[in-house]
Image (cartoon, rainbow, N blue to C red):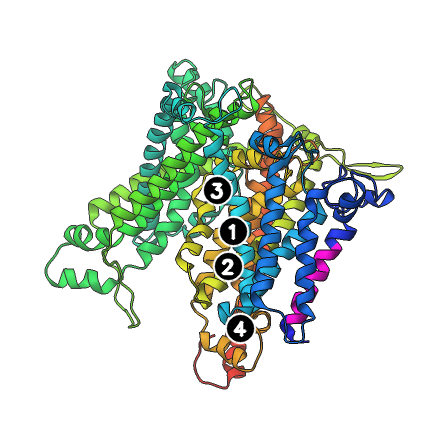
Amino acid sequence: MSRQSRHILLVLIIAWLGLVALPWYGVAAGFWSFAWLAAPTESANASGMVQMIAHGRHWLWPVPVLLALALTEVFRSSGPRSWVITWCGGLALAYLLLQGFALGLKGWNFSSLETLFGPASPQIGMGSGAFVVGTACLLLLSAGLALKGYMRGDVFLVSSIAVVVACIGLFVFFPVALILVEAALTPEGGYSLVALAERLFSADVWSVTWNSLILAVAVGLATTLLGLGFALLHKRTGFRAKGLLRLLAILPIITPPFVIGLGIILLFGRNGMATWLLNEFLGIPPSRWIYGFFGLLLVQTLAFTPIAYLVLIGVVDGISPSMEEAAQTLRANRWRTFKTVTWPLMRPGLANAFLIGFVESLADFGNPLVLGGNYDVLSTDIFFAIVGSQNDPGRASALSIALLFLTLSAFVLQRQWIGKKVYTTISGKGDSGLPAPLPVGVKRLVYWATMPWLAFTILLYGIILIGGFVKSLGIDNTPTLQHYVTAFGIDWTEHGLLWSGRAWPSFFTTVELAAIAAPLTAVIGLLTAYLLNRQRFIGQSAFEFITMLSFAIPGTVIGVSYILAFNVPPIELTGTGLILIICFVFRNMPVSIRAGLATMAQIDKSLDECSLMLRHGSFATIRRVVLPLLRPAIVASLVYAFVRAITSVSAVIFLVSAQYNLATAYIVGRVEVSDFGVAIAYSSVLILFMLLAIGLIQLGVGEQRRAARRTAPAALGIGRGTT
């Protein structure tokens, strides 16, 4: 039996095990529960084969028939025929999905099918058995395509592409498509373009959309200009506290999104410290000016400016000094050099920084929830349309479409603004020139803009830290540890250690789910990066675009779409930890892809080719050659995925449940009841926890890189100092 036949046989064995031994439908105790073993033949716990034989689920029979036909092909003397394996796998997978969407909790989901076939028994969401069989059918289809010669007949490569496309289609395309459909839902339960138009063009939707657009543009401009100021301060001035700038660049990534909003309230709220000082010494009465547009502009600029700084610092550092020296050689003064050479070369970075600030503002949920006041924005209106008294999924879908339209439009406009001009300044030649000094006016402007902002940011984080150690900052400043005891209290009882703090369950759940999601994110992201960097196949450009789509979709839209897609059969995931893990993986996957692509661009493809020439397959090549060289990208992917999973709020706020409550959702709950002390104490613990985790990982990465530089030349037996 050939290797391909053995592979197909293994896939079919897995499929039959899923069909015969595992529960076909979801069990009440959860996906990973084994309670169904106590009564495996009952309708709620039975496998697919038992469902067909004993419980009248006759519509499932085409799946085992197709699997049996494929099994006969394995034992043909001349080997399996590619077209039979392909059609068996493809048809079985298509039929499995078709019957899942056709039959629901009330029987047929479409009245036309009931008219055609008569009444049908209802079915709930798919369970572990259906999942295993569906995955095996996808792998069977991939094996058939490999037999046809796709990807040089490499089963691993074809299967990898199929799995990634299927996952993105199921967990990105399908939920987002449902938003478009749900917005056209009529009160009678049907669908109509008139209903879609009425929702999209209603006055309240347009009002909220304009609010979000104006705020996002203002935040994008403010964060871009301030980020540029900090980048110039770091690279083009003699500013000495550069380590402080790096710390402030890390803090927003590890800070829950609404914590800065809490700090602003503690300063400028009606009982805030700054409000009290202004009233006491200047006679300015307390007001609610911070709740609305100006408060949101302030807090979002504080939150997202460091991200723009991270983008622009590389752009400023990458400008070739030789070009600026050439301008000065032609008698251009500092201002003219900055205006005609330096500024135009920063154009792509400025566009990217503005885009990030714009999209982050649109997707921000926590800060508008805390400081929005009467200034309604799309992200919070979507939330209240789902969980509030409105309970109007159609309106939430229409608002999500508006949010998605603004985001994708920003991507398109950014590309057009940059255009097809060439901005390359770094070539293979050395560049030993010195960067041109800033014009005196620009340098003064940089200091005047950044120093007050830097001081204000330090003050704000100091206030946030202090707020957890007083009873009620601005009202009762008595020092206390009660907030930390309430959230993270630990008692010693006669039965042992008792985690008595109210925040411990959400903290442990968050860390557990993030620890599961992080390696999955790294695996899928780096595998996708390998396919994009090392392979050539039909539709590769479209494949790369869809992998980045989840980055362009705001988290609020993802959360709503997951509720619509996975709250009913055939895939019921709401209320489980699995839906949170899936959300984490596909929200953070694009960063893993980009980290992998950047690292693999530095690895010579000849290393892979040598392994393949020695008759190692793609899987062995990845495991033995590529993965050891991808260690920095792996660590970066794990760190980012883990940190973002812990601090995520906009998407998961819709998906948490009593059993799977997350840290950010718990903090939002404390904020809603004005329990700011516990919210700040919890946020401070999260920030310190993330700093510790990042520090340990960076320490490990540094040791690995030093070891690589020290041992690589000796191991290769060459005189070059490269790794």
The secondary element bearing badge 1 is classed as: helix
Q: Nearer the viewer, residue 228 or 21?
A: 21
Q: Amino acid at mark 4?
A: Ala
Q: Is residue 338 magenta?
A: no
Mark whose residue sits in front, 2 or 3: 2
Report the side of 367 relative to 441 (left or right): right
- Residue 179 location (% of width, % of height): 48, 34
Indicate which disc, 2 or 4, sits on the residue closer to the N terminus: 2
97 to 721, vertically: above or below: above
Tag of residue 708:
4
- Does residue 10 show up magenta in the picture? yes
For disc 2, the marked residue is: 528
Q: Nearer the viewer, residue 624 or 116?
A: 116
Gap between marks 2 and 1, in whole Å?
A: 9 Å
Percent of width and height locating residue 560: 53, 33
Q: Earlier in the sequence, mark 2 or mark 3?
A: 3
696 is higher (above) or lower (below) than 665: below
CA–CA distance between discs 4 and 3?
31 Å
The amino acid beneath tag 3 is Pro
- Span colored in magenta: 5-17
Q: In 3D space, how far apart are the residues under numbered discs 1 and 4 (Cα atoms)?
A: 27 Å
- Magenta stretch prevailing secondary structure: helix
Residue at which label 1 appears: 589
Res. 330 visible in picture: yes
Amino acid identity at mark 2: Thr
First-in-chain label (1 vs 4): 1
Mark 4 touching mark 3, by CB under 8 A?
no
Question: Which of pointers 2 and 1 lies earlier in the amino acid sequence?
Answer: 2
Would residue 644 appear left or right of 361 to someone viewing this image? right
Q: CA distance from mark 3 to mark 1?
A: 20 Å
- Secondary element type, mark 4: helix
